[in-house]
Image (cartoon, grey):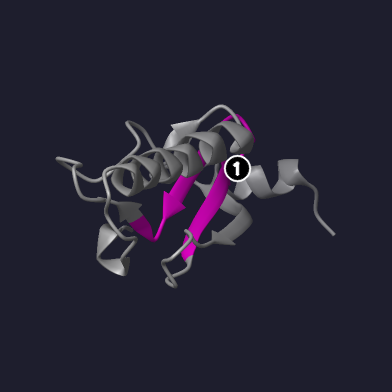
């Protein structure tokens, strides 16, 4: 079985950019919304960066635009998850506090 440095060599060639590997997939739901939300965590082949993708963004009532992270790149998987999940919780809680009932229409398709 090859090690990580052997794999990195495969991608460390001219015209090859942004090589990454899937390291984790997370799935959760928001209370009152049956649609599952998935987050995929990728690591750069050299292990020096982390990216996250999600299949939905939250745009609850009262939000001018969907809660989209400023960047898909993070220092760690934990940092990515904290920002993404935190954005969902914050927007959700604000809408519920304002008297809105949770609805799957709050979820906007992501990547």
Residue 26's x, y, as percent?
59, 57
59 in the magenta segment: no
Q: Is residue 57 visible?
A: yes
Residue 100's x, y, as percent?
27, 54
On the picture, is 24 further left or further right than 103? Answer: right
Check disc 1 and report the residue beneath it: 45
Q: Please identify the residue farthest to the front as the structure is shown.
A: 99
Residue 44's x, y, as percent?
56, 40
Q: Quadrant of the N terminus?
A: bottom right
Give the residue drawn at x 40%, y 39%: 87
As drawn, 32 above or below 19: below
Give the residue drawn at x 74%, y 45%: 4
As drawn, 105 above or below 65: below
As drawn, 83 above or below 105: above
On the picture, is 21 further left or further right than 68? Answer: right
Give the residue drawn at x 34%, y 49%: 96
Bounds of the magenta span?
Answer: 37-56
Q: Is residue 46 visible?
A: no
Circle count: 1
Q: Quadrant of the C terminus?
A: bottom left
Characterize the local packing of mark 1: few (<14), some (14-19) or many (20 or more) Cα atoms within 10 angstroms.
Answer: many
Give whichever of 92, 4 is nearer the camera: 92
User: Residue 64, located in which quarter of the rendered image?
Assistant: top left
Residue 93's x, y, as percent?
39, 43
Give whichever of 99, 94 is nearer the camera: 99
């Amino acid at each position: 079985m090859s090690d990580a440095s052997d794999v990195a060599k495969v991608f460390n060639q001219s015209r090859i950019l942004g090589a990454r590997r899937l390291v984790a997939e997370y799935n959760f739901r928001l209370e009152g919304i049956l649609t599952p939300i998935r987050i995929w965590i990728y690591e750069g082949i050299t292990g020096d960066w982390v990216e996250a993708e999600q299949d939905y963004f939250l745009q609850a009532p009262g939000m001018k635009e969907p809660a989209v992270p400023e960047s898909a790149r993070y220092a760690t998987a934990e940092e990515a998850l904290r920002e993404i999940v935190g954005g969902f919780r914050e927007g959700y809680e604000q809408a519920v506090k304002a008297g809105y009932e949770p609805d799957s229409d709050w979820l906007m398709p992501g990547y």
